[in-house]
Amino acid sequence: MKISIQRHLRSLMRDEFYRNWLIAIVVFVLVLIVVLIVAALTQDMEGALVAVLRSGTPSPSFPLAWHIWLGMLNTILITPFLLAAIIMTIRYWTERIQTGRKRYKSIKNHYVLIGYNRYSVSIIRNRLGQDGDSDALMILYTVAPPQTVRSELRALLPKALEERVIIYAGAPHLKEQIAQLNLHTAKAVYIALDGEDWNSSYARNISMLQTIAHYAGTQRVENHLPVNVLFNDDKAYEIAQRLELPLQCTGVYDADRQLVQNLDVHIYNFYENWARLLWSYSGFKKADGSYYYDRLDFEPLEGTDHFVHLVIVGFNSMGKALLKEAIRVCHYPNFDARKQIGKTLITIIDPEAERQRRQFQASYPYLAQIKDIEIDFRQAFLEDEDVRCDITVWAKDERQLLTIAICVKDPDEAMHMSLSLPEAVYVDYSRLQLENVSADGRRARLVKGGNGTRTRILVRQVVRKNLQTIINENTQHFSNIKVFGTYYEGIALNLLDDKLPICIHGLYADKLYDNIDRISEIEKIAVQDHFERWKNSWYPLSEEERCANRYQIDMYRSTFAYMERLAIPQGTIIADPVVVERLAEVEHRRWIADKTLFGFRQAKTGEVRVDEVRIHNCIDDYSNLTRLDQIKDHAVVLSAPVLVTWADKI
């Protein structure tokens, strides 16, 4: 209640009109109080008032007028000093709020955001905009000028959200100021320190995480406080995953030198977040539950020689994130290794593609293990004539499900590129539905909106409210262009929610994946009864093990679409063994791709599995696996619908 009143007072004090009226009212009330006090302190006030009421004139023994004038004189002399004190007090209070020096000791059940930059607004919008957090407050702890931050928040956020943000000014390395964030009563923490210099950004995030971990250990923070740490640079993110950063930085040692885990750390990357929003099960959804972005397999592939073709223009951080996500999700039932049918093709177009190819292959040296995806780096410009000719051929090829993602850094250049592609990308005359509107039949119009093409175009922008608004209203020529990659939408909280990954790992922990006969038992499990126990087994996992469970979800979108086409109700276990076998093989190829991106290679003849040196004997064709290993892939497919239902109930 106290916090709510303070929040409304802050809102009033920011408005100059209300602030002046508030000062005037306070001054008037204080002057009135002073007049009454002065009058009350004079002699025989009660007798004078009684005499006035009875006779209408003051008693000769008590000159009431004299005392009233004396009171007014005292008020005139005292009021300037009182008024100055009042104004100085109000100014001091207002200045402390505006400069971020005001602290609220009683605040609880709040969120903490450390750092203000281009990603922070997305975190605030998504976090405070959740239905279950309609009254929650967020402390924004920043070194940026609070007045500037407040002005930007007013421009970028709805008023109802902006007023729930409390700005604290301070430096991230000051432990005494971190203690003022009330972390022991917070719901979650978001660290979003960012900088142009990669090393400084990387170091500041680690330092901040260690500071919070130390504070949490000394304050006995319970229930594993969720801490989400942004690693914006893709290289820093890969290093943080491989070196198990969370486990190294999120614990303190007790008196017996035992590691005490007190935080639940989730590191994330802005570009990977957006790549998953495009194509994963946790993608960007509309209010009605449908997806805003089409899958890469936007048409049925099974039983055909069709294949997905993804063209990435600009191999920067965003382009690399799209490539890695495509490697994880582009595995489909129609792939035939013997006939080489249904293989996914990914083409990278960039003026420095050769250097980037060498760098990417050095980072991921075992890409050849992924049999159903072919990656082609092409050193060229999108405007080159041979490139434009190839795009025309790709767009007209009925076998290809073509998606072009333009990821160049300059948003205006990216938009211009998306509007300047060959005509075949925008219009497929063979698919247009026309009707004549003139006698000679030389003029026609579309029966329905749309341009008839199957090609999807994605263009990276900084903000959505620009030319995309105009393009969205064009339902014909440019209707297949969609904006992605904006700063204000990229930090999606559903991708930071580990409920579903925890359930996935819980099945492994309970060894339900080891016996195909026990899979039917998962429908009978009271998930809420087991979830707390599963969380306890989740916390000690390395970041790599956690990611393995998170990335498994990404394939669910294509899996469920395939089940829907087969008329299999969502939320039920697949009964057809042929379907299970087919999807299990797809799951195994996805698993190989995921392990390959984490640096695992196939065990050679005579070698055994050694996770510490990243050698795994299951990186092989599905047909070469033991039956027990195949059953584990079956279990992933069978459990997927039930797992999603579980997560919705928690």
Image (spheres, rainbow, N blue to C red):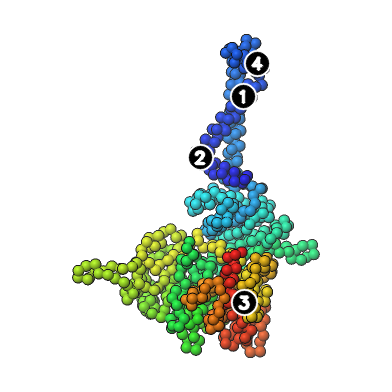
* Residue 512: percent from left, percent from top: 65, 76
Residue where numbered disc 2 is placed: 16
Q: Real-space Cα distance between discs 1 and 4?
A: 16 Å
Locate residue 391 relative to residue 548 in the image: left or right: left
Q: Mark 1: which amino acid? A: Leu
Secondary structure, mark 3, is helix
Residue located at (24% from left, 67% from top):
437
Position above or below: 65 against 348 = above
* Mark sitting earlier along the chain (1/2): 2
Secondary element at image label 1: helix
Amino acid residing under circle 3: Ser
Q: Around disc 3, counting alpha carbons within 10 Å, would you say few (fewer than 14), some (14 to 19), or many (20 or more)?
A: some
Figure quadrant of the C terminus: bottom right
- The answer for how far apart the CA atoms under marks 3 and 2 are is 66 Å
Q: Position of residue 3 (x, y in %)?
A: 61, 46
- Mark 2 surroundings: few (<14), some (14-19) or many (≥20) residues within 10 A: few
Counting residues from the start of the chain, the first of labels 4 and 2 encountered is 2
Q: Earlier in the sequence, mark 4 or mark 3?
A: 4
Q: Pointer 3: what residue?
A: 520
User: Based on the displayed image, in which of its 4 quarters is residue 132 positioned?
Assistant: bottom right
Question: Where is mark 4, residue-wise?
Answer: 47
Q: Residue at x 68, y 74 (%)?
A: 510
CB under 8 Å between callouts 1 and 4?
no
